[in-house]
Image: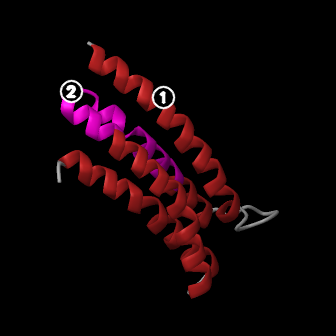
Amino acid sequence: MTGYGRMNLAGMLLLPVAASLAALIAFGPRSDTLITVFALNLVPMLIGGLVSWLLLRGAARAGKGQGIALWPTIIPAVFGAAWYLWRAVMPAEVAPGAEYIAGPQYLLIAVIVLGIVAWIGCRIARAR
């Protein structure tokens, strides 16, 4: 496995682990909550990881665009993890915990948009 493959795998696992840690801080040690939060956040990361893996395969052949190929996994994972951990420390007053249900939906949209942008970026990088 290359360094980019390791980064892709780390990005796929970063968000669900950070979301579960934030849920642990916010709700305490409830196994059903932790498993649900982990699974909900694993779905967009698996999709992002698959898109990044496919883009990395093409980028490895051309030798260009590997960093761009990681965007669908790394960018949502970093921003999502930071958001979840910040909201665990500073919860919303109106509906604490609502981001654990709504967050994965927004992350899925971000993964799809970044997948398209990364595909275009990889095509441009390979053309040069």
**Of residues 94 and 31, which is closer to you in this image?**
31
As drawn, 9 above or below 72: below
As drawn, 95 above or below 107: below
Residue name at image x 73 percent, y 67 percent: 96
Tell me: 63 left or right of 95: left
Instruction: Give the residues in magenta.
Output: 55-80
Q: How is the image coloured?
A: secondary structure
Q: What separation in Å lies between label 2 and label 1 (alpha carbons)?
A: 18 Å
Residue name at image x 58 percent, y 49 percent: 107
Residue type at the position of mark 2: Ala
Residue type at the position of mark 1: Val
Q: Which residue is mark 1?
A: 117
Mostly what secondary structure, the magenta segment? helix
Q: Residues within 10 Å of mark 2 (few under 14, many from 20)?
A: some
Q: Which residue is mark 2?
A: 62
On the image, the x and y values in percent for residue 61 come to: 19, 32
**Of residues 13 and 56, which is closer to you in this image?**
56
